[in-house]
Amino acid sequence: MDTLTDDLCYQALKTRDARFDGRFYTAVLTTGIFCRPICPAVTPKRGNVRFYPSAEAAMANGFRPCLRCRPEAAPGSPAAAGVHATLARAVRLVEEGTLDTNSVSDLAERLGITDRYLRQLYKRHTGVTPQQHAQARRLLRARQLIVDSNLSMTEIADIAGFGSLRRFNHTLKEAYGDAPTVYRRGLKQPKRNTTRRAPNDPFQPARDDLVLVLQARPPFDSKALLAFFRARAIPGLEAVGDNYYARALYIQGQSGLMICRPRADQPGLQVILRGPARQAILEVSGRVRRLFDLDADLPTIADHLSQDPLLHPVVTRHPGLRVPGCWHRFEFAIRAVLGQQISIAAARTLAGRLVACYGTPLPEDLVDGTGITHRFPEPEDLAGQPLNTLGLPHQRAETLARVATLFAQPGFADLDGSTLLEQLATLRGIGPWTLSYLALRGLGDPDAFPASDLGILKAASQLGGLTTPKALICHAECWRPWRAYAAQYLWAALATHSLRQETTP
């Protein structure tokens, strides 16, 4: 990832974009305090701030850490992913709910250390015990489900990991001062459908479906996102219509069906979960937010990019344009390699063959009428398989096998973005375009920019006479730190003028 200058850091600071969290720290001269980019405090004036690449650098220059945003817990710090691999894994397992059903001793045994050492490690680097961390996550999960889902209080207590309704009521009242039901009064909840879905519309909520509402920062161009996903939908894995995106999923050892439908009343999505994977609703909601880029501050980004005459007319024509994300890093890495130097349609065909051959079939009653039949294969399902039988060139098949073997290593998919890209770059058959595209959609880097993409080059040539990657990279400096959005606008410009040669997977 390219180095951020002070001016670029200030642009990112104004949006409080979580994707920059941990990449720089803001020190405020007037208060003597330094913060993370996501701090909720009022944005200071440009002349009153200094930027540092690490919390240690800010402290060495005499600044104190903010008590609201806790810089020590930013991504890349010991509290979140830092220098101790054991702690990073422990934090991730607690976030995933391990302590909801297991003890700290069980967690320590899984990590290969003593429970005493785990507590010391956790307390030293995060400031809380594993139990306190787990309790805070339960409270946050519970409140989100109370406000935004159609679940009963008993179901919420179970999913959030409280064990009993009585404990759930007591803990929330103690933490927030009110009973859980108070947070639903006056709120319009997603309705639970008490009838079976019509045979001709399997994408509507039905009995036993879990429904969650996710809001998006306006403006939100859901039609553009659905069109993007529709062109790339893998047969058997995904189904995309004018008002829905559906796919098979596999989370926490459970399969399921997910359907996302744009809301008619306000920007956002209605998320429908069907099958055993509904228990993982909170992990699903996080992935959906990244997939549909729901948290981007589009007005600020659009204002910044529209200052360039080359992009101004495109930005004006496409308000609310988002950068589509991905469901899972491994799945997207495979899709990106499959799509190298071929059309979107050809990449879909190859991906459909891969899913049909190596994906796991789903129960018929779960996906009846949707056209979805399999979930995407796991890395272990592809490692060592003769993938050249899919109709791939020999070298491309070998690259896929190497990617699967790398992702099959424990913890590889959870590495920080830079480390993951560095390791993928060592594989034969993974070039600069693939790495840039992985950073853009697979890792959600808002400043990633695949300058060698044929579609982007064609649009840049049409709009501004920029015909080479070198010239485009030089010009794109004025788009930072939002070059990923600039790339999306350029692709949109081709689609608008029917100029696009379909080359992007």
Image (tube, grey):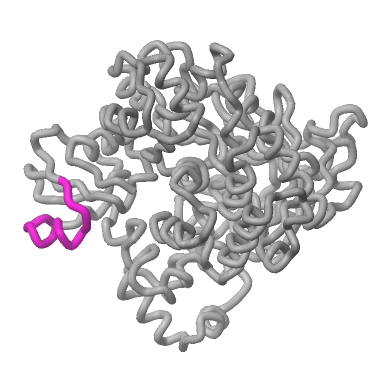
Q: Which of the 4 image quarters holds residue 246?
A: top right
Decide: is 89 above or below 466.
Answer: below
* As drawn, 252 above or below 225: below
Q: Is residue 502 left or right of residue 421?
A: right
Residue at 9% in and 50% down: 32
Q: Above or below — where is 99 with respect to 289?
A: below
Residue at horizontal 41 percent and vertical 43 percent from the top:
445
Name the residue rendered at 34%, 74% in the picture: 123
State the image coordinates of residue 126 (x, y, percent, origin top left): 34, 68
Q: Is any part of residue 481 visible from this angle?
A: yes
Residue 198 placement (x, y as % from top left): 90, 29
Decide if residue 8 is on the left or right side of residue 400: left
Quadrant for the C terminus in the image: top right
Observer-nearest of 375 and 216: 375
Question: Picture coordinates of residue 477 (x, y %)?
Answer: 27, 32
**Residue situated in front as seen by the camera: 226 or 266:** 226
Q: Nearer the viewer, residue 464 or 100?
A: 464
Q: Is residue 147 visible?
A: no
- Left or right: residue 389 compared with residue 503: right
Q: Residue at x 40, y 14 (%)?
A: 463
Quarter of the view holding residue 371: top right
* Magenta segment includes 61: yes
Q: Is residue 490 magenta?
A: no
- Between 479 and 192, which is closer to the camera in this rendering? 479
Tally of numbered discs? 0
Indicate the quadrant where residue 238 lies.
top right
* Magenta region, residue range: 51-63
